[in-house]
Image (tube, rainbow, N blue to C red):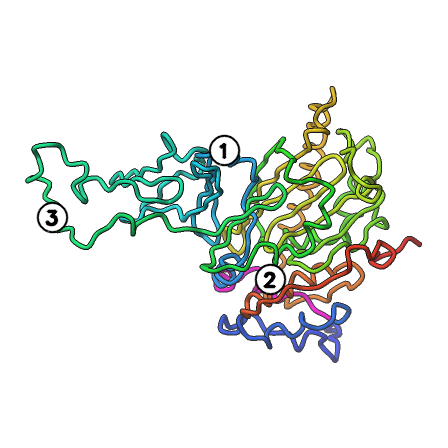
Amino acid sequence: MSETPSRIPATDPYAALPARPVDPAQFTAESTYAPTRLPVELASTLLPDAYTSPEFFALERERLFATSWVAVGIAGDVARPGACVVVEVAGRSVFVTRNRHGELRAFHNLCRHRATKLLDNDAREVGTRGRIRCPYHSWTYDTDGTCLGTPLFEGSDVPAGQEPIFDTSVATGFDRADYGLLDVAVDTWGPFLFVNLSRDPSPLAEQLGDLPARFADHRLDEWVTQRSTTYDVAANHKLVGENFMEYYHLPWVHPELARVSKFSDHYRWQGPGMYTGMCTTPVSRNTDAGGWDGLAPLSTLGPADADAGRFVWLFPATALVVLPNHAFVLFNRPVAPNRTVETAVLLAHPESLAGPDAEDGVEQLAKFWDLVNTQDLEIVERVQEGLENPAYRGGRMCFRFEEPLHRFQNMVIDKMLGIDRVPGGDALDAGETMTRMFPDP
C-alpha cells in the first residue's frame, strides 16, 4: 500500500511573495517590497535575497552605506592632532584625524597621484610630524588635506646641480594646490565618530532625530573605552541588527540575560530619527551568572535614566546600549552578504571608574557581554544558514515584538528605492505606559 501523501494547504499564505531568486532588477522596485510595506500586524519580513544575494549586497553598499551617516569609531581615539583611525565604509578606506588646529577631518585613504593607499588599517598616527606621506612616490600631505610636496614632479626636491637630469618643465598646467586629499564629511555625537560619503550630505542631526535629547543627561561624550573585542560573524549585517532590536528571543537564547533583563520589563523607546529603540526598566541586580552591576552608576542621572537600560540601533549598522554605569557598542562592518566583522566596545564614565573595585567591575561586565554577544552571533549564523535555503521565501512579522524590525526594514527599503525619509515615533515624554509592547500580566 502506498503511503498517504502529506496534505498541502489549499491556499499558500506566501503565494504573493516573490519567487527565489529575485531578479536583481527588481531590487529597486517598490512592488518587490509590498509584503513588508504593510502595517506590522500584517507584514512579512524583508525578502530573503536581501540577506544572501551578492547583487543586493553591492547595491546596498551604494544606497545605504554610501549615503548615510555611518558610525565608524570612538571619538576619543582621535582626541589630539595627528591621531587617526582607518575605517572602511561601503568598501572604501577612509581615515579620520585632527589637523594642527584640533579640527576633525576625514579623507579617502588614497594618494592623488596614482591612488596608492596612504595609511595602513592599523595606523594610529598619520605620520612623522603630522605629515601623511605616500609610500609609493612620496607625495606628502598635511592633516588639513593640503598637498605639501610632489618630489621630482615640479622640481622642488631636485638636488642642486642635477636640474637637467630631472627636467620637469614638461609638467605644465600642474598646481599641487589642486591635488589635496579627497574630503569625506565627518561629525561626532556622544562617543561616536560618524562619516558620510555623500558629496553634499544632510546634517548628522537630521539622521539622529531626537536621540541627543533622549540621552542628554548621560553626557555620553565623556565616556571612555575600557575594552574592545572583534568578532567575525558568518551572517548578514542586517541579521545582527534585527536580532539586537527585539527581545522575543530572550528566554530561549539568553537564559542568563533574561534573569537580569526580564522579558516583561521591555518597551519601545523611540521617536523621530534613523534608529530603533527599546528600553528595559527596572535594571535588575546581578545573579550568579553575572549581569550589569559591577561599576557605580553615574550620580547625575535623573530617576528614569538611573533605573533603565536603553537599547538603540543606529541606522545602518551600529548598536548602542546605555545603562546607568556603562555603555556597550557594536560596530558592524559588512564584508559579504553572509559575513560581518563586528567590533564590540565597552565604555564607562570616569566617575563610575573612580571606585576601588572598578577594574574588577569592568572585567565582570566584559565577560557578561561576551557571553551575551556570543549567544546572539551563534543564533544569527543559524538564521543565515536557513535563509540560504531557496525553500524559504519570507516569514510573518510577530507584531507584538517585531515592530522595531518592521521600522528598520522599511528604512532599508526606503534607501534601496532612493527615498529620503526619517521615520517618526513616540514623543520623548510619552512614558512607558504608552509604549510598552508587552505589559506585565
Q: CA distance from mark 1 to mark 3?
A: 40 Å
- In the image, residue 380 above or below residue 387: above
Q: Residues within 10 Å of mark 3 (few under 14, many from 20)?
A: few
Q: Residue at x 78, y 64 (%)?
A: 399
Q: Residues within 10 Å of mark 2 (few under 14, many from 20)?
A: few
Residue 148 located within the stretch drawn in magenta: no
Residue toward you, 33 or 219: 219
Q: Position of residue 58 (x, y in %)?
A: 47, 61
Labelled pair 1, 3 in contact (Cβ < 8 Å): no
Q: Quadrant of the N terminus?
A: bottom right
Task: Please report the bounds of the magenta region as a residue range.
Answer: 43-57
Query: Looking at the image, which residue sits at the far right?
Result: 441
| Residue marked by disc 1 | 80
- In the image, residue 272 above or below residue 297: below
Q: CA distance from mark 3 to mark 2?
A: 64 Å
Q: Earlier in the sequence, mark 2 or mark 1?
A: 1
Q: Residue 405: which quarter of the image?
A: bottom right
Task: Describe the element under mark 3 as helix, strand or loop.
Answer: loop
- The amino acid at mark 2 is Asn
Q: Residue at x 64, y 46 (%)?
A: 377
Q: Residue at x 31, y 44 (%)?
A: 147
Rendered image: mark on residue 389: 2
- The amino acid at mark 1 is Arg
- 64 sits to left or right of 10: left
- 192 sits to left or right of 98: right
- 396 sits to left or right of 153: right
Residue 54 located within the stretch drawn in magenta: yes
Q: CA distance from mark 2 to mark 1?
A: 50 Å
Rendered image: mark on residue 169: 3
Q: Earlier in the sequence, mark 3 or mark 2?
A: 3
Query: Looking at the image, which residue sits at the far front?
Result: 101
Residue toward you, 146 or 25: 146
